Image (cartoon, grey):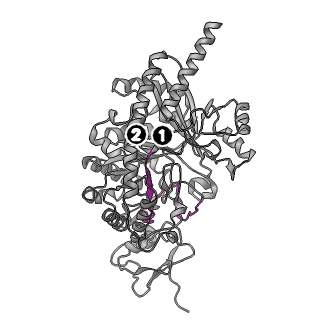
Amino acid sequence: MNDTVISLDALKIGSRETLAASVAGGCSSSTCGSAAGPADMPPQIWEKVKDHPCYSEEAHHYFARMHVAVAPACNIQCNYCNRKYDCSNESRPGVVSERLTPEQAARKVIAVANEVPQLSVLGIAGPGDGAYDWRKTRATFDLVRAALPDIRLCLSSNGLSLPDHLDELAEMAIGHVTLTINMIDPQIGTAIYPWIFWKGKRRTGLEASRILHERQMQSLEGLVARDILVKVNSVMIPGINDRHLLEVNRVVKAKGAFLHNIMPLISAPEHGTAYGMAGQRGPTAAELKALQDACAGGANLMRHCRQCRADAVGLLGEDRGQEFTMELVPETIRYDPSKRQAYREWVAREREDRRSAATQAQAVTGGTVAADTPPMLAAVCTRGGGRINQHFGHAKEFQLFEVDAKGVRFITHRRADNYCIGGEGIEDRLDAVIETLAGVPIILCAKIGDCPCASLAAAGIEAIDAYAHDYIETSLLDLYRQRHRQAERRATRA
Amino acid sequence: MALQILAAQCSVCGACEFECPNAAIKFKKGAYRIDPSLCTECEGFHDSPQCVEVCPVPDTCVPARPAA
């Protein structure tokens, strides 16, 4: 199977070719979809994504989503999934701690909306398949819509049952649907799906994958025809569908998918999945990035996915689910829109301010730094809002940005357990964090202690807290400009 | 002629409940149970019992042992 494992060298060549093609097509960046702002897309599309954290990288700094685990039943078996799995410390799709009835789910949504003003999206992402477990999905959406008319409703599905509910989805004003499409070649599907349940029978092998593929394409086309935005999720499985996902990316773009999210397979024997037990590995960060880069010119890529649980609550990258377990949700609860409304008004102003500050900084940097100056890579500690506002020791993940004369681009995020517990740093954890930051020369945070700062420096990573609470874009552009000036001075002196 | 669900194995997903053509499967006290008086093993509806076909955990929907 080695010949199907992605070779980084081959991908670099592919990337240049596709990049050239993409420039011809009018888009020079593979991240332009999810990172884009209102200037980059038609107003009716921006209206749909501006407060959806998964569909807009820009929005994910401000808005939160929640999933309610009302749909446990599934109609297919995937080799990366074990339906018996259940752990509150595990963060990956399909995992939940408690299952809810539609009535419980609606109460929980109201409780979260009252406490988390950033909440803008309710998604149903299983833990099974929401379109198959349709009665519960529909009942939940109906109850929530009645209580919170302005919340966005969102559904994730494998697509097998979804074509049966297309008109209903449109009537219910479900604006966003995520389809998990791991292949467009049923032969490849046979290594991913051991069986599907279809028309009263368990189907296996090529028949199963062929039916699933046909239904997935019907789903995609039917959703696009109804103006429902579609995000396609694909699990990257080294040696099975990795190279094939380039083809998937091309096809889903041609069929009108708004965004393509290529996620790394999460696989370990203790998960009890077929892949985990067979020792199937997930891709490395470098392999994932190489594949994503090779998709330039195809469907726009989502790079800020955190592969959240089917009961996640909060901003992407944070999970407040444990604050809202059913025993903590009151029996009777009334929705109070005041917090969410106040927050939205604040976001509208803040966003405008951030955007104009970034545009200004961009103009200054673009005017002083030559366009061919190499880019600078930096990690950022943020709690949201598009600002550098997190203490280094509290960061559970780092957002990576690249900046050059053309602007600031979100690259990816890297997860790390926060090393600071109760104010005391633990050395092993700091080592793990340093490993996470491999290849990143600069980290911006709101504050950092002397000790970790020295350890980072020893590892060749410069920590900077001079931009505490400033916007990410303006800070990076300013730093880039300064570094450029310093380099120029050194060059003149020499 | 009836099936039963081995509760210790069941993942409580409920797929069997709505696939059952006899409405023989009910959720009671945290577990799905098949009412043996209603279960026909899907005879007359399908070639094979639907709960067995859809269940994600192997050997969970199995023939009921006759009462001793």
Please state if B65 lies on the left or on the right of A463 as rendered.
left
The three-letter amino acid code for the residue at tag 1 is Gly
Mark 2 touching mark 1, by CB under 8 A?
Answer: yes
Q: Is residue A490 magenta?
A: no
Q: Is residue A80 magenta?
A: yes
* Quarter assignment of residue A483: top right
Q: Is residue B16 above or below residue A455?
A: below
Chain letter for the residue marked with disc 1 in the picture = A
What amino acid does circle 2 point to? Arg
Q: Position of residue A125 (x, y in %)?
A: 43, 57
**Label 2 is found on which chain of the structure?**
A
> What residue appears at the point 34 percent right and 43 percent down from the top-left corner?
A257
The image quadrant where one finds the N terminus of chain A is top right
Residue receiving disc 2:
A351
The answer to whether A316 is drawn above or below residue A202 in the figure is above
Magenta span: predominant SS is: loop
**Left or right: A120 as drawn, with respect to A322:** left
Residue indicated by mark 1: A386
Which element carries disc 2, helix, strand or loop? helix
Report the quarter where the C terminus of chain A lies. Answer: top right
Give the magenta-colored segment's residue range.
A62-88
